[in-house]
Image: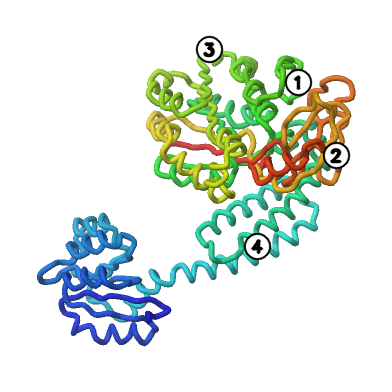
Amino acid sequence: MGSKKGKIMWVDDEIELLKAHILFLKSRGFDVEPVSNGNDAVNLVNEQNFDLVLLDEMMAGKDGLTTLAEIKDIKPRLPVIMITKNEEESLMEKAIGRKITDYLTKPVNPSQVLMACKKVLEQNRISSEHVSRNYMAEFHAISRRLYEELSAAEWIDIYKKLARWDIEFDDHPDLGLKETLEDQVRDCNIAYGKFIEKHYADWVNDDPHFRPTLSPDIVRKFIFPKIRSGNKMLFIVIDCMRLDQWLTFEPLLYEFYNVSTDYYFSILPSSTPYARNAIFSGMFPSEINQKYPDIWNREGDDEGSMNHHESEMIQALVHAELPELTRSLKYIKVLDSEAGWSVDRKLSTYLENPFISLVVNFVDVLAHRRSDSEVLKEILPNEASYRSIVRTWFKHSWIYNLLKKFAEYNFTVVITSDHGSIRVQNDVKVIGDKDTSTNIRFKYGKNLNSHQKYALIIKEPEKYKLPALGINTNYLIAKENFYFVYPTNYHKFQSHYRDTFQHGGISMEETILPIVTLTPK
């Protein structure tokens, strides 16, 4: 039976001279197997399970680099620490290229070896204990803050912390703290719903300089000042991208860009026809409705059909604020991978445009298709898997390829999202007629009603700068992780939509969003 601290194989053609080192490791609880040559080492790796290999680089017969390569062929994930007299850069590059975990330079003393072994074998345990202690301290701090009167900036700070902990726990699944975090997020969203209900109507009617940044403020606040300062701008809106998703692929850009992050609040409903139209027009939905009344007069309420005016909207906004740029603005919407790679291939044709606006739909499409696909529900059971898929997409996508190229052409890039999404788990009944909108997280129609504990009931749309679509039209916007279900066919819709990713409601995940500025290095 192996040691709890780990089983180590030490390979050195002068292993007899290392008895004191080996006894020291054994006294500290490690199980050590001494081996005097590369051939025996490779055979033992085939036959036994080891947690770590200490490998001499200069050995008679099969040398350390050859032995390393053969060990990695058998067990690619087995950690190897190379011990060498030679500090030549070329040798280290070869060793690192073959995926050594660490290296030590001779002569080594027992304490050095011990610390190197602990670093590899106990890192996860030490890291997990550290993570657990830190989160529980943060848990209590956040819980106390929920009893205070919090500002918009403080809510952003809380959500940033929760999102980072969610990602941290992906690397420590055995801690058992995911459920605790989920419960805390739920408690925070309950308090956040009350905060939005209390302040949102004032925000939308306040001067943009005195309120938190909202969807209609983004272009004026983050794009136009940079263009006026002489920067070429690429503005990217990734539909339905959450903060936690962005945080997982932000590190992929560190090699090419300096990254600065601000935050804003999506308008309500936190859904594409409202939030993204607000971004590109610089207006609230009630103002948009006066200029583009057909948006809400279409048959049905398909989200894709309600964003056909984005190009006109951004053109009008640019013309009003920077008229000299009106003709040189380029607006591009990418609905699928084929169209995205086409944009990548045509990059040279866009580089003369000082302002390029790009909409990317992948994340939103994934959320919608998951709702209707049992296969995708199986693949994406929770937020962690959703993050993982989105990161994989980004890493291999045309948009990542495009961003690497834009870094070479000295464009400043601003990336944001129009709204996020939340995994809905609790249903609430809604009363409405056959003409009520079909959205799961928000509704508009005549004389709608639901439980006010679980929904913001808007009886005067004008106060919230929402379109008043006829007499007695009101809106319902779901709070926390609730979704609307009609009493008719209740169980059918309840089971179909539970545990799906939806947007349009009031939650931190849907409405607190990053605005990321990338400056080429």
| Mark nearer the viewer, 3 or 1 | 1
* Quadrant assignment for the N terminus: bottom left
**At 37% across and 79% down in the image, what residue appears?**
2
In the image, taking residue 25 as reference, residue 92 lies left or right, namely left
In the image, taking residue 279 as reference, residue 56 lies left or right, namely left
Q: Earlier in the sequence, mark 4 or mark 3?
A: 4
**Residue hosting label 3:** 327
Q: CA distance from mark 4 to mark 1?
A: 42 Å
**At 79% across and 56% down in the image, what residue appears?**
148
| Mark nearer the viewer, 2 or 4 | 2
Q: Which mark is residue 287?
A: 1
**Residue hosting label 4:** 138
Image coordinates for residue 462, horizontal then vertical, percent: 84, 26
**Residue hosting label 2:** 450
Q: 75 or 345: which is nearer to us?
A: 75
Q: CA distance from mark 2 to mark 3?
A: 48 Å
Q: Earlier in the sequence, mark 4 or mark 1?
A: 4
* Quadrant assignment for the C terminus: top left
Q: CA distance from mark 4 to mark 3?
A: 51 Å
